[in-house]
Image: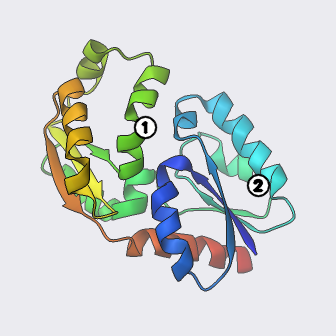
Amino acid sequence: MYALISCGVFRDEVERVVSDLDFSVQCRYLDPGLHVDFDELSSELKRELERCRDRKIIVAYGACHPRMEELLSPYRAALLDCQNCVDALITRREVERRAEKGLYFYLSPGWLDCWRDMFRRLNWTQEEARMELGSFKGSVYLDTLGDARSREDALMEFFDYTLLTCEIMPVNLDHFKSLIIKAKNRLEE
């Protein structure tokens, strides 16, 4: 049995792919807002790593902390091979390809559920959020769960708050699943 410690932003995606894995995992989820406070993220991640110390650990995060590798080094833990939650879902190559069209703010289902908390943690009022996000051409909803239609109201709330128009991008979870499998395989080397 492996432990999988994941950012809560991936909860729904993890729950979708774990039944397709050829190994057993016990999933633990951390609050998605932790990545806006490095001290909090470090503390909570270390706490979970200690709880899972007796197992090999897959860590479903990107480079969300500047010392992520150092935090994981005392444990039998492997980090997903991605920079952030966006390229965990659509690959770095796809992010770069889309960046040729301009800078976009990406929302996954988890991000759509927690953006208000994230902005609150950053102390962003509506006006500050609009200023901070002003360089983005728009937003892209990564439809990993095939639920964009049922999330239209939530997407409209994000638009109303940020003034970023939204594009829907269908995403299958094959790449995300492959990153989990690759992390597990690195633990076996």
Q: Nearer the viewer, residue 150 or 55?
A: 150
Q: Identity of the amino acid at label 2? A: Ser
- For the question of whether residue 103 can be seen, the reply is no
| Residue at horizontal 78 percent and vertical 64 percent from the top | 76
> Residue 92, how many percent across, how many down?
35, 60
Q: Which mark is residue 73?
A: 2
In front: 58, or 157?
157
Give the quadrant of residue 180: bottom right
Q: Which quarter of the rendered picture does the C terminus lie within?
A: bottom right
Q: CA distance from mark 1 to mark 2?
A: 29 Å
Q: Residues within 10 Å of mark 1 (few under 14, many from 20)?
A: some
Taking 145 as reference, is 86 above or below it? Answer: above
Where does the image place residue 161, in percent across and percent down from the top left?
Answer: 23, 25
Question: Which residue is farthest right?
Answer: 54
User: Which numbered disc covers residue 114?
Assistant: 1
Q: Does any portion of residue 99 appear in the rendered image? A: yes
